[in-house]
Structure formats: structure tokens, C-alpha cells
Amino acid sequence: MFDSERYREEVLDPARKNGNTPPADLLLRYGIDPGRPPRGDAFDAHLTTVVKYWRQLGTQRIAYRKIVEALNAAHRQLAESDLLSAEHFLKDRERVAQATGAALEEIVKDLAGDPVVSAAALTATAARLGGGAATEAKLRALLGRRRIRVIDELWPLPESPPARGSTVLRSIRTLGLPLSLHVLADGRPAVDFTLRAGLRVDGRPLTADRFGVVRERIERGKQDDRKTATDNLLTAMTAALRDGTLDQLVLWELTEAVRPAAGLGKLRVVAREANRLGLQREEAEEFALAVLNRGGVVPVQRDVAAEVEELLGAGSLRAAERLVLAMPADQGAEVRDRVRAAAGRVDELASRAQREIAAGRPEHAAELLATAVREAADDTDLAGRLRMLAPPPAPAVRAGTAAGDRVTISWTPSPARTGGIAYQVVRTRQRPAGSATDGDVIGRTDGNELADTRAPAGDDLHYTVFASRSDGVWSPGATAGPVSLLPEVTGVSAVADESSVRVTWSARPDVTGCTVLREPDGIPVKAGRNGFSDEDLEPGVEYRYLIRAGYPALSAGITVTATPQAAPKEVPDLAVEPLPGQDPGRLRLAWTLPASGEVTLRSSTHRPRWSRGAEITGAELTSYGKELVGRTDPVANRRAALVLPMPAGRLFVTAFSSGGGRAIVGPTVSVTNIAPVTDLRARRAGPVVRLSWTWPDGVALVRVHWWPEDGSPERAEQVDCWLRAYRDDGGLQLTTGVGPVRISVATVSRDGEGETVGSPVGARVAGSGVPVNYRFVQAGTFRRKTRLELTSDQPCPLPNLVVVQSPGRVVPLRPEQGTPVARIPAQRLEPGRPVSVEVPVQATRGPYRLGCFVDDHSGHGPDVVLKGVPGGG
């Protein structure tokens, strides 16, 4: 069934755009389905229906008369040549298809140099080839294979400069900027932006705050032509952003900027220039296509009346008036009347506004002009007259300090009868500002609040708010103040040791000095600009300090507390020691107490991330591992020990010393619940001790420590013994000296994580004593004297000795078996340097015997073994 509406849209409309040329494909021209063409009478009936529709359309709609005339002429020619048949239509279609295909290939080759092409150009090309929608679809597919994008709707470009175009153009020329957006670059070569779906800069919608950042930056510079031009440019762009015309303003700038490149007629050249200016690449290609098609290189049937309607709806009355003049005199009577009526309303509003100004009611005039500008936004005279009317001032302004370091200014909005009011806040000292530039400009906004983050401290500050509809025309000022800003110091940090407190802070550059009172007594403490140190304090007492900043007036002040206490010191050592009875199921940790600080043992499955001696916070301490809790037993020589059940698996134990919110990382030991050695035996042979034990299964290495019984384990000697060497030597032999020693034997496991030491098993080995030889020597002929000589083959500390005399010929075996006749004080005995002492022998009638013994009244036992020949007479 013939669908007349579809036929008109898909066949006749493209033919009209192609210069009223009928399609070359006869099946398309007559609206016949090529897949199921009618035959015989059905074919003739279809042609009759189509021709009748042509005649009806040409009579009812003037716009289709020319194409209908061309279709009728071609139909008569086919009829005269007897070619109105389905067979001829199909055969001719093959010929047209071949010709069209070759033409399409040539067209695609010609377009391959460009990344984009307009849909209007494709439609016109398809129509020129006598195709229509099918040909256009084929052409789109061919271009798609070449990765050429088809733009269905060309980017609409501005026909005339926007309202603020001259100001922007003048400013960017003074600044040497390619586009107004480059004022946001902040030192970068350019900004990246997109326009087609709304202006976005660097991927984000543009806001007034972005302009405010630039304005704050330029306010710090000196006043010159560049600063003035930047200020004018930001004002124009802010106003365009407010009224929604910034997109068109930037698009117009971009169009003007690529005009020289467009003169070359090359799409890639124009696109490259637009991309260099910051427009995203794909949008730059679409923009270049629109620029090169500007002026209608593709024939377009203009609907002038519709364009005028669109201009009126957009508030472009003056452009609508110009377009109406180009319309034929016999067309568009209705739209002409609408334009005439709108112009009359605007003129009446302008006249009434002038009368209100003369009567001293400028805000009523502004309201009338704003109404007129909404209908004639492209009337620069009306817009200029509105801008020259200053709005009423803000009724009330409030200023107060916030957060101690800034002043917040807020105000009641101006009772202006129009929108688009902007406010500028000016800061002055000691007096209100007389104009919008009389002082330090804090900022501009279309809201009703601003914060002064750079307010000077200690002065009486006044904040004046000016309202404006456009840059340079300001209302009278409304002032708040005076306000005095007295910020406190910041970044306060207090550190206490055993008898002093040190406090530091950061002060503003304009601080003249700081005062500090130690509370509750109110004692002044001498302070510098950035801190103080309070000495000779009592440990364990909390002190409070009131710190006030001077400008020279003093701030309210802030309080900081601190408690002196000794700083924690590192735990000197930590060891895993054997338990009495060699109990492998329990763990004994021993350490030397630090000079100050409380010791905390914490265990974890991994080593601490801090190095030994590092200072950490209390929070860091509690976040590491698990605290080992138990009864701590004091040990001699400032040592302490903690006995715990031996945990399963491997763990690391670290000793921390803490105090005053700080902690010092101490030593770490690794403990693994691996089987200990058993049956530990030790045998002494003089200075040599021979060890033996039973090895547990799976263990091939043990670590042996030994140290003097009266010494510290932290100074122990160490030796590693492997199972193979133990078996080869039949045990382990240590040269420990002759004194008593303590021995610890611990199994060791090594893996990819490192080395783990199991629970140690200990033993005590008694000393053997240093051999010391003595003899009694008699000399003299008439008066004989007796001397005691002591010698040794190795150096040793000689203890106190006593010589006893007993009557008879029986040698004394113990000191108490005789009478002491001489005492030799303790001293050092060196090899080759004998000690000789005279012995005053008691007179006796019969024989006597002399013996030498250790005078062991101290109870420490002998350190030497005396060997010699008793004397006597």
C-alpha cells in the first residue's frame, strides 16, 4: 500500500533539496518496493496512484510545485518512450546502482582526508546521485569503514558578536591571550575545554569561584594595564556566566580565532588550530566542519518566518527586525505584525524608563529596562542604559570573626527590582570605604556572604559592600565594623621531661609578641615569638599554660597542659633464659630495667616496623601486637624477669619503654616453640668444660651461651654447634676459665623468614680454682728468719691468706688447727713475680709446723687452690 507521508519525507523532500531533481532510481522515484515490485495491472495502478498524489501535492502546497513539475515532465518522457514497465525499472535500477556505486567510491576517496562530514552534505550527495535514503545509508556505511564520522547536526555558529564581545576582545588583545578562557591557565600553555554540550573547563563545569581564584591572584599584583584588562575580562566573563551567554561568547571568540586558518579551506587545518587553542579533538573536528560549511555550501531551504519566530523567542528583537526586511513583501504578514508589536512594546518601555529616571526613581527605570532587554537582548543601547543604573545598596551588613583567623562578612541582598546583581566587598582600616576601589578588594560574588582570610590582625577593620549590575557602576556602600581580628597561635605542641616543659607554636607574621601565664597561680613565663621553656618544675604535677598572642592587643588565649616526667629510655637488653628444672613448657624473658620509663613487653607474629631506639607514640605502641601480661619478678643488678606459658608457633617479643605518651623501641627476640635439648650434662677439667646433651628430632643446630656466675648474660660468650660436628667430636668443649660459670643451650631453627631460637636449657658449672704454689724458706745463721713465697703459672687475684703455727710434728690441715702468726692481704699474683712475706714464728721449745690457708671470712669461697710444702722446725 502506498504510504504518501513516508514517500514525501524519504523521496520528495531530498529531491527538493537537490535542486528539485527527481531520483535517478525509477523504483525509488515511484515509491516501489524493489524486493516485491508489482507486475501487470498492479504496476499500472501503483503508477496511477503516485502520479495522482503528485498532482494533488502540487496544487495544495506551493513548496512542492517545482519538484512535481519535474516529476511530471520525466513521467511523460518515459511514457512517450514506452518505458513505464516493471522490467525496464528493474533493469534501469541495475544500471543506476552500478553508476551510483562507482560514484560513491570516488566520493569516499575524496572525503577520506577529513575525519568528519556533515549529514546534510551526505543527503545532498545522495540526492544528486538520484538515490535518497538508501544511497545515503550506503554512503554512511562506506564512510564508517574509513572511520569518518558523520555529523547529523552542524554546530550552530554565532551570526554576530555577542553583547560583551568587544570588551572581551579588547582585554585579550591587551593580555596577549588567544581566548578569554586562557586567563584561567595559571601559567599553563592552555586550558582544555569542551563546548558542544555546555562549556566545561578541564572536565568540570565553569563556576564563578574559578574566576574568583584568578581575581585573588591578580589582586596581589601591581596596578597596571594588564591588571585592569584582566579585571575587565573577568567581570565580563562572570556576567556572561550568570546570564548563560558564556558558551556563545567563547564560541564566537573561537570562530574569530580560526578565521585565518579557515581561509585555506582545509578541515584538518581548522580542526588542528581549534585543538591547539584548547578545544577537545573530536569537538574541534566538528567545529571545523561547521566553520567551513558556514555560509551554506550545502543548499538549505530557509524557512525565514520560522527563523524570525525563533529570534523573537530568544529575545533577539533587533535581529528579527533585520531578517523581516529580507522577506518578500507578499509573505509573513503574521510574523511581521508580531515583530512590529514587540518593537512597539520595547520602545514604550524605554520611554517610560526615561521618564522614571527624570522623576528620580532609577530602580523603577531599571525594572522597565530589564523587561525591555528580555525582549531585545541584542539591543546594546538598552543593555547599556540598564547597566549604567546603579542598584540600591545592601540594607544591612554584618561582619564578625570566625575560627579566630578570618572575618566573615554577610549582608542583606539589595532590594533591586532586577536580577543579576553582583557585590564587591572592600576592606579599609579605621574608616569605611568611600568607593568600590577605595581599599583592599576582598572579592566579588552574586551571593550574600564572603570570608576575608587575609585580614590583618589588631586593627579596626571596616567592611563595605557595593552592589552593581555591571562593572564600574556601583551603588553607595553599606558598611559593617569596626572589627578587630585577634587570631590565636596555631600548631601548639607541648613536650615535657623530668623537670621542664617546652611548648612551641606557629604565630602569624604580624604578631608583635606572646604572653604566657602558668596557671592556676598566674605566674608569668618568659616566651619568645614561637614558644617557651619552663624549667625547675616538679615531676608528676600537671601544669596549665595560657598563651595569648599580641597584635599589640592580646587575643583571648588558648590553654595547653603538660606534666613533667622523665623521658623513657631504651631497654638495654632482652633475653630468653632457661628456667630452673629445664621446663620446656614455659618461657622466661629477662631484661635490664631502663634508667626511666615503664617496660612493656608485646608479642607479634612479625617484627616491629620500627628500628631499635626509635621513638613512637602511645597509639603506635598499642597498635602493635599483644601485650604480655604477668607477674614481673625483680632480679639482682636492676634486672627483671617474666615467666609465661610457652606459646605455640613462632613469635617475636619486643621490649618497649614508655612514659609521657611516648615510647622507645627496645630489643626484639624471636621465640619458637621447638623442642629443647634434654639430658644436658657438664663436666669440668680445669679451665675446660665439656658439654653433652640429647638432640631432639629434626634439630641440627644449637646455640650455646656461657658467662661468669657473677656476670651479666648480656655479655655472654656464644658458639653455634651443628649436629655433625657434635657427633664427630663426641660433644662440645668450652674453654671457660677456672671460675664458676652459667651455661645456656638453645635449639635453633632456620627458614626463609630467618632464624628462630627455642627455649634454652641451662646448667651451672662450679669453678676449679687457680693453682698457687707456696713454700716456707728459712734464712740466717744466728737469728734465723722464715719467709713465705707464693708463685703461680697464670695471673690470678690472690685472696686474703693466713699462716698458722701448730706445736709438734703434725701438719695443720685447717686454719683452726693452729695459731695464726701472719696474715697476707689480697693482691694480684702474676707469673714470674712471686709474692714473698716474712712470717714471725713464735718461739717454742719443741718442734712446730707452719701451714698456709685462704682466710675465707667473706664467705665467697676460694678462687685459688693452694699447693705447697708446710714449713716448720
Image: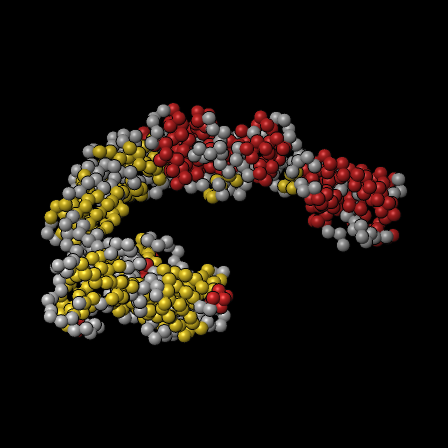
Left or right of 547, for residue 439: right
Q: Is residue 663 above or below residue 820?
A: above
Left or right of 43, for residue 526: left
Residue 550: x and y in percent read 18, 40
**Quarter in which the N terminus is drawn:** bottom right
Which residue shows up at 20% across the image and 55% down it?
565
Residue 534: x and y in percent read 17, 47
Corner quadrant of residue 579? bottom left
Q: Looking at the image, which residue sits at the far right?
A: 82
Corner quadrant of residue 467? top left
Corner quadrant of residue 61? top right
Residue 72: x and y in percent read 79, 40
Which residue shows up at 38% across the image and 38% down it?
213
Which residue shows up at 27% across the image and 71% down it?
631
Which coloring applies here? Answer: secondary structure
Which residue shows up at 31% across the image and 36% down it?
442
**Of residues 847 and 207, which is closer to you in this image?**
847
**Of residues 6 and 150, which is closer to you in this image?**
150
Q: Is residue 605 above or below residue 12?
A: below
